[in-house]
Image (spheres, rainbow, N blue to C red):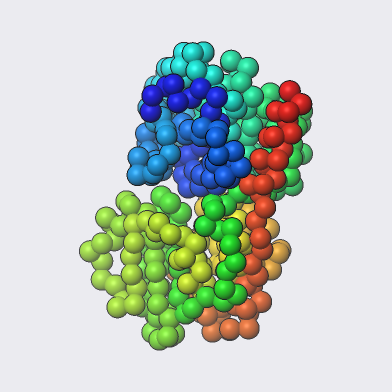
Amino acid sequence: MDERGFEGSLVVTGGGTGGHYFPAVALAEGARARWPDRPVAFVGATRGIEGRLLPQSAWPHLLLDVEGFVGRSPWRAARAALKLALARGRLKAAWRRHRPWAVLGTGGYGSAPALLAARALGIPYFLHESNAQPGLLVKLLAPGAAGVWCGMDAVRARLPGARCVLAGTPVRSAFLRGFSPRGGPRLLVLGGSGGARALNAAVLELAPALLERFPGWDLLHQTGPAGYQALAGAPLHPRHRLAPFLENMDRELEAAGLVLTRSGASTCAELKACGRPALMVPMPGSAGNHQVMNARAMVDEGRALLVEQGPGLAGDLLEAAGRLMGDPGLLAALSRPEPNRAVAACLDDLEQALAKA
């Protein structure tokens, strides 16, 4: 996009994974509906999910060559730091000439250049943290933020000195509608927008026995693009269908009777909005163990069962999925749609904070 498009705009930034990108899209959709005359522009990374999806969208956007630091060798971390400094400098130069109205960040390394540039220039910026354990970037920037919107109440205690508002996790406009109370006889498997190797392998192993046991059910399996290439040639049960990525997630969830998934905060929010029961396998080693905390919260709310990832994952999932699929009463008890009001809560706070500034 032309840098002049940033003038007076609301800049939305967040990505790397769907858990960061989709709440950013939800906030952008809400902002466009609330302030139709206010430009909305995205800033993200060429390597993240936004690098694949933004060019296919109508959103004005700028993609920057940045990468993450976590788990990198010293040489690669130094390279990432240099790329971040260059991207931040590029945005600072552009925004001195064409100053945005405000910047909204939903996390992920792709949001770092925009948030750091906003802080340096005194542009109001807001953060959304979906998880109970805040990420490193949020911890760093929260004290200077005009507001930190929390998806879970537990995060507030971990951000001392920040102005925190409990808002929930935004979901895309497609989830802000009524959903049928029950899905059909379909097991929907979601490893996340990037897939999950261990989950993909376990599902491939258990699917034949599970589908033979429940002949009325089928299985739709989002593998992630890399997983799709790895599994495309594998022998499959006739009712087991693979997809690298599912675009219309609200419809896919509505059609499902059970969802087998990781437990990122964005996924949890979408499951709650459409009220679909879940079998959750938290990603091991997630930052601050946040996926385990998210899954336990869903279990405590009576919306999911939790299976820890271990050596016998396929067998554990076969037992748990069989228990749920064979008990319509249990599936019904876990099915409870809940309207999501997070976008309105975030944008109400932004409006009030900027009016006072």
Q: Residue at x 34, y 57 (%)?
A: 244
The reply, left or right, for residue 245 in relation to residue 174 is left
The reply, left or right, for residue 317 in relation to residue 150 is left
Q: Check the image and report above or below for 126 versus 234.
A: above
Image quadrant in which the N terminus is located: top left
Image quadrant in which the C terminus is located: top right
Q: Check the image and report above or below for 261 versus 96.
A: below
Kindly tell me whether residue 328 is visible in this rendering: yes
Q: Residue furthest left?
A: 233
Q: Nearer the viewer, residue 291 or 310?
A: 291
Q: Residue at x 57, y 69 (%)?
A: 179
- Could you say where residue 77 lies in the image, as x and y percent from the top left? 44, 25
- Could you say where residue 225 lies in the image, as x and y percent from the top left? 33, 52
Kindly tell me whether residue 107 is visible in this rendering: no
Q: Residue at x 70, y 40 (%)?
A: 348
Q: Check the image and report above or below for 42 versus 318.
A: above
**Residue 190, quarter of picture:** bottom left
